[in-house]
Amino acid sequence: MLFRSHGISPAVRDEAGERRLETIDATCPLVTKVHTQARRYAEAGYAIVLIGHAGHEEVEGTLGEAPDAIVLVQSTGDAERVSLPAGRPLAYITQTTLSVDETNEIVTVLRRRFPQIQEPAREDICYATSNRQWAVKELLDEVDLLLVVGSLNSSNSVRLVDVARAAGVDAYLVDDLAGIDERWLDGRETVGLTSGASAPERIVAEVCAWFAERGAVVSEHAATHEDVNFKLPVELRRAERSAA
């Protein structure tokens, strides 16, 4: 059984143990950090605000870490209305794949209403998510259409589309080449291309090649260099050592 990168709740882990399933824990270390924060805050008696999207796999997993201590806030409206227990220390944590701008707006409301609320020791939003959002913002002055390679259920991919549209630039999310509607290109001079954090590089390369085959000049936009590497899940590393 593979535990996905978005993370799982303890209940799922316990069920896998009860059924004696072989498991591979592929939870992203950045998600694990948020889960650890949630447990620590809960054990210390904090009431916790989780900023995130209801129903998202990562949010479900984080809620499961401290269900009696966490309240979910999805918007500035929620932040204005949320009721938190008096006399308890307060803290907030966030889903790792959110819009940086929208999250900051929510945090601003929470800080105004609850000045003593504690923030994470380190930023919760994934570096790959935030880097892509900043890169898109830099690109928008140069393009009149943005295509984002990513899945419809990918929160960070959807956020890239939101960033472009909020700036008045047309943007579409596509799984792969088949998702491109050539009518979107009518009258466009410059098309920007980006991808969600987990989109396969192969698909991005195929889209670039598709444009090049149609006479487009394809160039790379210089952005933040990412050199973070995560180890394989411990179960796979053990298997590698055994095979060697």
Image (cartoon, rainbow, N blue to C red):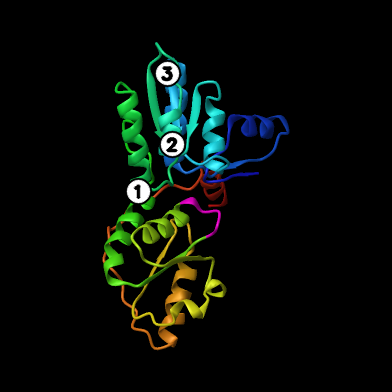
**Residue at numbered disc 2:** 77
**Residue at numbered disc 1:** 127
Q: Is residue 36 left or right of residue 244?
A: left
Q: Above or below — where is 173 with respect to 25? A: below
Q: Measured from the top left, where is residue 150 in percent x and y? A: 50, 61
Which quarter of the rendering shows the N terminus? top right
Q: Which of the 4 image quadrants contains residue 168?
A: bottom left
- Give the residue type at disc 2: Gly
What's the residue at 63%, 41% (across, down)?
Answer: 23
Near-viewer residue (42 or 192): 192
Q: Predominant secondary structure in magenta? A: loop
Near-viewer residue (62 or 25): 62
**Residue at numbered disc 3:** 46
Q: Which of the 4 image quadrants contains residue 171?
A: bottom left
Which is closer to the viewer, label 2 or label 1? 2
SS class, disc 2: helix
Residue range highlighted in magenta: 151-155
Disc 1 residue crowd, few under 14, some 14–19, many 20+, Cα 10 Å = some
Disc 2 residue crowd, few under 14, some 14–19, many 20+, Cα 10 Å = few
Q: Is residue 87 left or right of residue 151?
A: left
What's the residue at 41%, 31% (across, down)?
Answer: 80
SS class, disc 1: helix
Label 1 close to label 3 by CB (< 8 Å): no
Q: Above or below — where is 13 with respect to 163? A: above
Q: Measured from the top left, where is residue 223 in percent x and y? A: 27, 62
* Precedes in sequence: disc 2 or disc 1: 2
Near-viewer residue (84 or 37): 84
SS class, disc 3: loop
